[in-house]
Image (cartoon, rainbow, N blue to C red):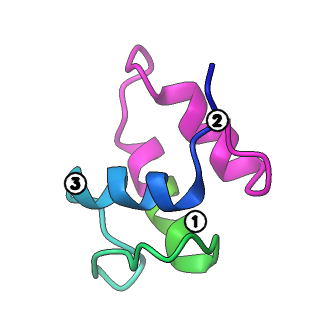
């Protein structure tokens, strides 16, 4: 499986309408900070167990420097 950069995750989350902890769209800057993490957690919590990116979202949340 190809790696997805932080900036790509930010773009995916924005396209899906997932916002940061302040309910703002993410800045697609490639930096993994608290706003990106909060958006990943929101997405993971709202993603059904069988969804395509379910495991990748949890991996990104739990291992921010090793996004799969």
Residue 37 drawn above or below residue 16: below
| Residue 50 percent location from the top left of the image | 41, 14
Q: Is residue 50 above or below residue 27?
A: above
Which is more toward the observer, 60 or 6? 6
Q: In this picture, which residue range is highlighted in magenta?
A: 42-68
Q: Nearer the viewer, mark 2 or mark 3?
A: 2
Q: State the CA–CA distance, disc 2 to disc 1.
A: 17 Å
Q: Quadrant of residue 33?
A: bottom right
Identify the residue at image location x=62%, y=39%: 58
Is 15 on the left-hand or right-hand side of 27? Answer: left
Residue pointed to by mark 1: 37
In the drawing, what numbered circle is on residue 3? 2
Q: Position of residue 36 (x, y in %)?
A: 52, 69
10, 58: nearer the viewer: 10
Residue drawn where x is 34% and y is 50% of the image: 12
Q: Position of residue 27 (x, y in %)?
A: 39, 79
Q: Is residue 24 magenta?
A: no
The kind of secondary structure element at disc 1 is helix
C-alpha span from label 1 to label 3: 16 Å
**Which quarter of the figure has residue 39?**
bottom left
Q: Quick one: quadrant of the C terminus?
A: top right
Residue 53 against residue 38 in the figure, above or below = above
How many tags in the picture? 3
């Amino acid at each position: 499986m190809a790696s997805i950069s932080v900036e790509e995750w930010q773009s995916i989350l924005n396209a899906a309408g997932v916002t940061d902890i302040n309910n703002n769209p993410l800045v697609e800057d490639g930096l993994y900070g608290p706003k990106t993490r909060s958006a990943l957690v929101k997405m993971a919590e709202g993603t059904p167990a069988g969804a395509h990116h379910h495991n990748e979202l949890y991996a990104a949340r739990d291992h921010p420097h090793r996004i799969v």
